[in-house]
Structure formats: structure tokens, C-alpha cells
Amino acid sequence: MATVNSRRKVGIGLLGSGVVGEAIQDILFHDLKGQVGSDVELELRKIYTRSPQGKKWFGKRKALFTSRPEEVLDHPGVDIVIEALGFQAAKQLPQFRDYILRAFRNGKSVVTSDKAVLARYGKEIWSAAKSSGQQLRFEACVGGGIPVIRSLSESFAVEQPEAVFGIVNGTCNYILSQMEKSGKPYAEALAEAQQKGYAETNPASDVNGSDAEAKLLLLSMVAFGLQIEPGKIWRKGIEEIQAVDFRYAQRIGASTIKQLAVARRRGAAVQVFVSPALVSGENFLAGVDGATNAICFAGTSSSGGRGGRDCDYVLVGPGAGGGPTAVAVLGDVCELARGTRKFSGLPSLVPPGTLKLQREDEIDVPFYVRFVVKDRAGIVGDIGKTFGRMGVNISEIWQLRHVEDELRGLMQSYKLKQKSGDVLPFVMTLERTTLRQMRRALDSIRNRDYILVEPVWFPIWSSN
Ligand SMILES: NC(=O)c1ccc[n+]([C@@H]2O[C@H](COP(=O)([O-])OP(=O)(O)OC[C@H]3O[C@@H](n4cnc5c(N)ncnc54)[C@H](OP(=O)(O)O)[C@@H]3O)[C@@H](O)[C@H]2O)c1
């Protein structure tokens, strides 16, 4: 990094010229013209993308573009490599990891917005950063423009973390908000999200929870020092939620349904999961609408060890979008350029290896279960007895009056052939129980001849 007129000149190499990459170029070429405050000048020296032609800045900055990643990674004038590549299939991730490792080997620090590569290869990437003496930053990987990683690892440095949880996928939040507001079926709300650009053409990683999982793994690493591989935590998507679930939610404590990513202390273990959850109307998260993200943090020091509170801090903001994500990426770049904060190894509040992941079967929460059954006598009693035999206590039973249109909508969604009068939806809320007990009970119930569709079940959010 050379010093020019007392301003530090820092060479940047950019991998990726998609939504995030172009927003970074917009800021560097147009808004900032490279200058950051009075002390740093960021100079974008090479941009890799598979097909440079047609990219927004290609016409004006042709010489900067390349379709060969090594021209960025091996560039002698590049001090910091930004990795903003977007993958379509998991098989591409090793290639992206290799780019990051090569940058380290070449003496460059890396800033990435790519949560998928970090969630999958974090251990290897962190250890390579450490052994090469290079820096790695990843603020944009979680919560887009919300400064959550820095807040956790720096502002809460002396905290004893109890919980970090919240809404980390704007696409799911948008779909669920639309279903709640307009009573739209899931498929229609998803199509609308795609039309408005909130959901990808292939929205699988959003709606099945794997995008939220990748972010949660990074949060669990920073808060609790856990290094968990993707696929090792309990994960439930939002695909099974129907408009009717919002009606029941409303009746149960004026609640709503949100996709939550949760990591919280359970003694020497940490409970980590992604799932839709029933959230009481009184909870702050219930009011977080549309594509917004909100991440809550609870710590023993802030609460004076009193516990029992849902959270001490909430960080809210735009969870995605080129502009906010580029701001987060360039915030990291500036930090590296200024050399204000250096650390090697994992930036975690709890030393890695101190806490372990709670076994999935032991996750213990209250549950919401919605059944759709053939309308005949004795069903509620039979289900109740089965739960009882498995040691699962029922808290409440809800059976709302359903108008003809609502039932027809539900039957269409499930392609049921019965007459609407023969179909009965109802909901049970269950007291805190483990996933093991819950699964055993549902295994026994789901094959009864009166069950018309797979029961829909998910946690009821509670602060402990
Ligand atoms: N968009 C957001 O709001 C947001 C927010 C937070 C984090 N992120 C993360 O930031 C990263 C970039 O997101 P994005 O929205 O900018 O993605 P994008 O618009 O799809 O752009 C992806 C870039 O990666 C390149 N690319 C895609 N597949 C590649 C492959 N197999 N090999 C080499 N290059 C490949 C593309 O090249 P061509 O276009 O030339 O084919 C393009 O330059 C992703 O990891 C994403 O998860 C995005």
C-alpha cells in the first residue's frame, strides 16, 4: 500500500461483477471516486467476471475487466481482493475457496460477501488466513448492510453471549409477510416475490432455509466459537406454511409466523436451528416486515445475569440489495486499508472448542402443529392420547370456523378431492418438548387413516 500526498493508496481486485460487484463499482467509480475520508484512496485495479461484455462499467473501464481470475489474484498492485461471486451449485464452491486461498498465498487480504463459501470452507479459509498472516473480513455475509459481525465481535467483545437470533432472509420474510397481509397462498406469494426481484428464479436456497443456515453458522461462529458444517443443524423451510396458518397464528396471542435463525446457550451446549416459528404479536420481530432483516442479541453482562429477557439489542436494516451489501463490503475494505483492527484466527466471543452444538434431537421448544383431517368424531381424542403416550403435553386446541373459500383454497393447495364439508383443519399447541419426542409422536400419528395431509409443525418462539 503506497502513500500518496499523505493519503494511503490501496489497490483493490474484484472477483464478481453481478448485483454486488456492480454496486461496488458504482460507489468506487462514481460516488466516491476512490477517496475514503481524508486518509485513504481505494483504486480498483482489476475486475474478474465470466462475461465482461455487457457489464455496466465495461464500456468506460474496459481495460480493468478480465475473464481470467488469476489476473486479479496474481496482480502485483492488488492489496485487497473482494470476493463477490455468486454460485448456482455447491460444486462451484471449491473453486471460489481456491481463489481466496490463492489471494492469501499471494500476500493479499480478502473481503467476501459470499456466505456459502465461508459456511462450507470456513475452517480451512480461517486457518489459511492465519498461517499466511493475511486478514479476512465478511461483514456483508450476514444481514447485508447491517453491521452485525463487527457489532458482535467488537462492540460486544466483553459480552458473555446467551443468544443471537432473528430474521436473516429477506425473501422468506417478504413471502410470509405477503401471505399474512393478503391471505395469498404460498405459491402466489413466492411468484410475486420473484416478479419484484426479491426472490431468485431458483428460490430453493432461500425458502428451504439453507441461505439462512449459512448466515446462522457464521453468527454461531462469531458469538459462540462454533465451527459447524452446513447440513449439521436442524433446518426447516417455509414451503409448508399455508395462509390458514396465519389465521390460527392471529388467534394464538395475536401471533404471526416468521422464519427464524436461532443460536442460544443451553448450558455448555448451543441450540442452533433455522425454522419458521410462531412469534407473539408483542415480540419486536413480529413487526419486521418485507425484505428487512433483524438480528437480536442477548448477553449475560448486558442483562446483569438476570436472563429471562428475549434480547438486549436488535440490529435492523436492509438485509440484501446491491447498495447496502456493497457498503458493508467497502466498510471492511476501508478497515483493512486503514489497518485499524487486525486479528488472525476466528473473531469469536467465546474461544473455539469451549461450547458444543446441542444434539438436534435434544432441541426443546413449545410447538405449533396444524392438522388437516377427515371430519369425523374421535380424532382430536386419538391424537391427544398419542401425544400423551409419548410424553408430549398439549397446551391448547384450536378449531376455527372456516368459510367455504378458505377451505377450498386449502384443498386446492393440497390437491384434495374431498368435499369441503368433509375436511377439517385444526391446530394444537404443545408445551415444551424435544424434537425426539415430537418426531416419534408424529411418526405414529401421520399414518392414521383420517390424516389427509402431512401435519405442519414448527416451534413457538419463547425467550428461554
Ligand atoms: N445480492 C445481494 O443482495 C447479496 C447480499 C449479500 C450477500 N450476497 C452474496 O454476494 C455474492 C454475489 O452476489 P450477487 O447478487 O452479486 O450475485 P450475481 O449477481 O449472481 O453475480 C455473480 C457474479 O459471479 C460470477 N459467477 C457466477 N458463477 C460463477 C462461476 N461458477 N465461476 C466464476 N464466476 C461466477 C458472475 O459472472 P457473470 O455475470 O459474468 O456470469 C457474476 O460476476 C454471493 O455470494 C451472494 O450470496 C449477495
Image (cartoon, rainbow, N blue to C red):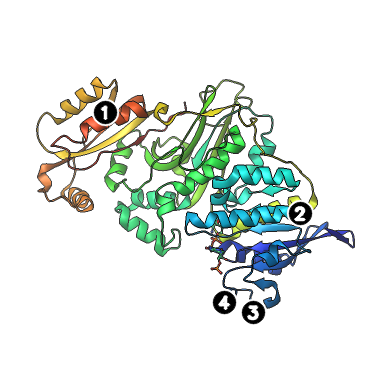
| Residue type of the residue flagged with mark 3 | Gly
From the viewer's perspective, is residue 329 above or below residue 302?
below
| Residue 220 visible in image | yes
x and y percent of residue 356 in the render? 54, 28
| Residue type of the residue flagged with mark 2 | Gly
**SS at mark 1 in the image:** helix
**SS at mark 2 in the image:** loop
Q: Which residue is mark 1?
A: 441
Q: CA distance from mark 2 to mark 4?
A: 32 Å
Q: Earlier in the sequence, mark 4 or mark 1?
A: 4
- Would residue 95 be found to the left or right of residue 1 on screen? left
Q: Earlier in the sequence, mark 3 or mark 2?
A: 3
Q: Which residue is mark 4?
A: 54
Quadrant of residue 158 within the rendered picture: top right
Marks 2 & 4, CB-CB < 8 Å contact: no
Residue at 44% x, 52% y is: 205
